[in-house]
Every structure is written in C-alpha cells, then in structure tokens.
Image (spheres, rainbow, N blue to C red):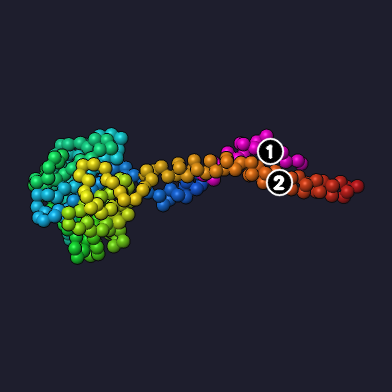
Amino acid sequence: MVYDLSKNRWIGIILFSVILAILLALKVRENYVFASSSVVFNEIFYDPSGTDSGYEWIELYNPLSVELPIGGWKVQVAGSIFTDVATLPIISIPTKGYLTICESKVVECDVYVSKLTIQNGGESSDGIQLLDSKGNVVDTVIYDSPNTNNLTKENGTVVGNNETASASGSGKSIGRKNMIDTDNSYNDFYIFDTPTFGSINTTSEVLLPTGEFPLLIILILLFILLTYSDRLNGYRINLLDSLNATNKVKSLFHIKKGS
C-alpha cells in the first residue's frame, strides 16, 4: 500500500486547522467572559461628595437587540437585607442603551425617585439589585467586604468575600467593565474617579470586545497554520515516506516468506 495524500494537501491542512481552532475556542470559552444577556447595573453612584441625599443615582444598560419595557421593575438596596427603594414607572430602555435612575437633585435624569438611600459600605458588604415585574432577580451588585450579612447573588448563593466589588469612596462611582457580567462583582466592576453618567464606561485597561475572543483565536490559528503550511506539508511528506518505506519492507518480508 502506498500513501499519497498530496492531492488533498490543502483539504487536510484546513481541516486540521479548523478542528484545532474549535477545540481551543471551546476550551477558552469555559473560562471566558461574555456580555450579559439581560439588563444590568452599568454604574452606581452611591457616595457623592458631601451629603448623599438627593444626589445618588444608578445607571442601567440594555445589551439586547430589542427595546425592553421595565415598568413595574423594582430597585432594592441592602445593608443587612434587601428592601425595596423604588418601583419604576412605565418606561423602556432602548436597545444597546442606558437608563438613569436618580434622586431629585441630579440633573437630566431619565427617571426620578424620591430616595435611593444606597448604603456606602464600611464595616461589611452592601448591595443593590434589580427585580423584574414578576419579582425575579435580574441583576445584583455586592460591594465592600466582608459579607457578614450573607447577601446573595441572582441565583440565590451567598456572595464570597472575593466576589465583592471594591468600595468606591466619596465622589466616585463603581462601573461595569465593557458591560461584562460574570455574576462576580469583583471581576465586573471598576472604581471610576470620574463617573460617566448616562454614557459608556471608559476603562483604564484595554479589554477585548466581549464574546469575540473565541472567533479571534480561530482566525489567528488559521492564519498561522496556513502561513506555515509548506513546513507542515514537509513534515507530512516525511511521515508518509516513512510509512511507505515501512510498507515496502513489510511487502518484501511477506514475499520472501511466501517464497
């Protein structure tokens, strides 16, 4: 038997490249972060300079490709337990858009509420969460530590001390990184020295667009493998020559044995 795959050189190389790229992409996907599939807290300004009353605000982001009505949704805040602080009126968040919810002294806000009274952290964790009109928890942010009151995330599990966002400090906000949502506030939030009210968060580090990393890996691998295809083909030819030589030896052995 003589092995001859030269006619299928490019098919073999491309098939090998695709399989390897897919396997690597799936492995990366296990630990990679993707954009949220639901409305999230994008930024929280809970500790204005001076008095907090009247100046606190939160910002929601809608990552969906459709406008989302959120009338009847609730905002809850927590020190020891989560309690309602605001019920949203009939309003929608535009696709890929933002909605701000504020106390009375904030200028040009989308929705005004009488009080948010968001806790400032300190000796233990505090939190804020968003509930839809049916009472389902949509998003939760826990900040500062330790979580001595056992505040929970969306799935009901207690947030670990290594999962809480850092406390912002006076006059600063905590904001989400590129709309990333891992349900781990420590990973998802930066401290912003200058809050970005009603707009996209600017980050201090370069982040890949969420959800595109596996595709990028595939393209890079394909480029590398196709660039070095001649070298790979040389290795393949050497391997085939070795296999053919081995088969020739076996054939001669069988011929002699049969004689």
Bounds of the magenta span? 1-21
**Residue 81 vertical placement versus 87 (above, below):** below
Neighbourhood count class around disc 1 (C-alpha, 10 Å): few under 14, some 14–19, many 20 upward: few
Marks 2/1: CA–CA distance: 12 Å
Q: Residue at x 37, y 44 (%)?
A: 210
Q: Position of residue 19 (x, y in %)?
A: 54, 43
**Helix, strand or loop status at disc 1:** loop
Q: How many marks?
A: 2
- Kind of residue indicated by mark 1: Leu
Q: In the shown orientation, is residue 224 left or right of residue 135?
A: right
Give the dominant element type of the magenta stretch: helix, strand or loop.
helix
Q: Which mark is residue 142?
A: none
Q: Position of residue 254 (x, y in %)?
A: 84, 48
Q: In the shown orientation, is residue 67 left or right of residue 8?
A: left
Tell us which disc is closer to us: 2 or 1: 2
Q: Position of residue 93 (x, y in %)?
A: 22, 37
Q: Residue at x 61, y 36 (%)?
A: 11
What is the quadrant of residue 159 in the picture?
A: bottom left
- Kind of residue indicated by mark 2: Asn
| Residue of label 2 | 238
**Residue 42 vertical placement versus 65 (above, below):** below
**Helix, strand or loop status at disc 2:** helix
Regarding residue 242, the answer to whether it shows in the image is yes
Task: Check residue 17 for magenta coloring.
Answer: yes
Q: Observer-nearest residue: 130 or 98?
A: 98
What is the quadrant of residue 142 in the picture?
A: bottom left
Q: Residue at x 37, y 43 (%)?
A: 209
| Residue of label 1 | 5
Q: Position of residue 116 (x, y in %)?
A: 13, 50
Whichever of callouts 2 and 1 sits on the residue coming sooner in the sequence is 1
What is the quadrant of residue 6 in the picture?
A: top right
